[in-house]
Amino acid sequence: MTNDDVHARLEKLESIEAARQVTQQYARAIDSLDWELLAETFTEDAILVSRSSSHVGRDAVIANYRRALEPPVDRKHFIINTSAEWMSRGEVIVNSYFIYTYAGDETSVLGWGNYTDRVRIENGTARIAEKRISIDRSGSVLPGWMNA
């Protein structure tokens, strides 16, 4: 194995790890409603696609999350079964399942689905260029469960 081969393998592994980390950063930003962190998660020309809508551009993506996640409630994302595939230099596709909880005074929701993230890595920084959200199941688990 040549030095070039080793460097190429290292670049792939580092890109894959950076892509996995930005997926986790997304969940932390959503759970904490940290809009600045969420903005850092997406590229300027990001695309967000879900069952009900699509949004183009970081500002539109963040505005969509602000609308969708108000009013504040307790929420957590659990991202599992993550796989990452190096596509080309600077691009990784991350597929993962997610489970989420969403609990407030009058609501308690449990849901799950999958994310497909096309992650772009530029100058060592990974950001989501395209996020596809597919919710398989989501429903109320009232009465009582998850309510304080």
Image (cartoon, helix red, strand yellow):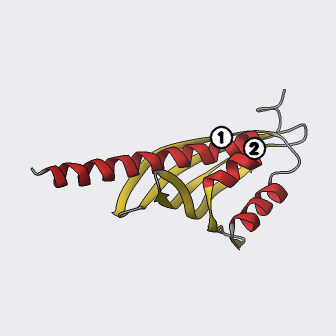
Front in this rendered view, residue 113 or 23? 23
Residue 6 horizontal side relative to residue 113, left or right: left
Residue 61's image quarter? bottom right
Which quarter of the picture shows residue 113? bottom right
Residue flagged by tag 1: what amino acid is it?
Arg
Q: Position of residue 59 (x, y in %)?
A: 75, 65
Q: Residue 41 carries which label?
A: none
Q: Tally the numbered discs.
A: 2
- Residue drawn where x is 70% and y is 71% of the image: 55
Name the residue at 66% across, 69% down.
51
Q: Which of marks 1 and 2 is in front?
A: 2
The quarter of the picture where the C terminus appears is: top right
Q: Do the residues labelled 1 and 2 touch (CB within 8 Å)?
A: yes
User: Is residue 119 shown left or right of residue 28?
Assistant: left
Q: What element carries label 1?
A: helix
Residue type, mark 2 in image:
Asp
On screen, residue 140 above or below 137:
above
**Residue name at image x 71 percent, y 41 percent:** 31
Instruction: Pick out the residue farthest to the top.
Output: 148
Within 10 Å of disc 2 (Cα), the crowding (few <14, some 14-19, many 20+) is few
Which residue is under mark 1?
A: 28
The mark found on residue 34 in the picture is: 2
Q: Quadrant of residue 44?
A: bottom right
Query: Residue 88's x, y, as percent?
Result: 35, 66
Measured from the top left, where is residue 97 in percent x and y? 52, 50
Circle 1 packing at 10 Å, graded few (<14), some (14-19), many (20+), is some
Where residue 15 appears, as percent x and y from the top left, is: 39, 52
Is residue 145 shown left or right of residue 127? right
Q: Nearer the viewer, residue 91 or 80?
A: 91
Q: Vertical placement of 90 versus 103: above or below? A: below
Q: Which of marks 1 and 2 is nearer the N terminus?
A: 1
Residue appearing at x 64%, y 55% in the figure:
137
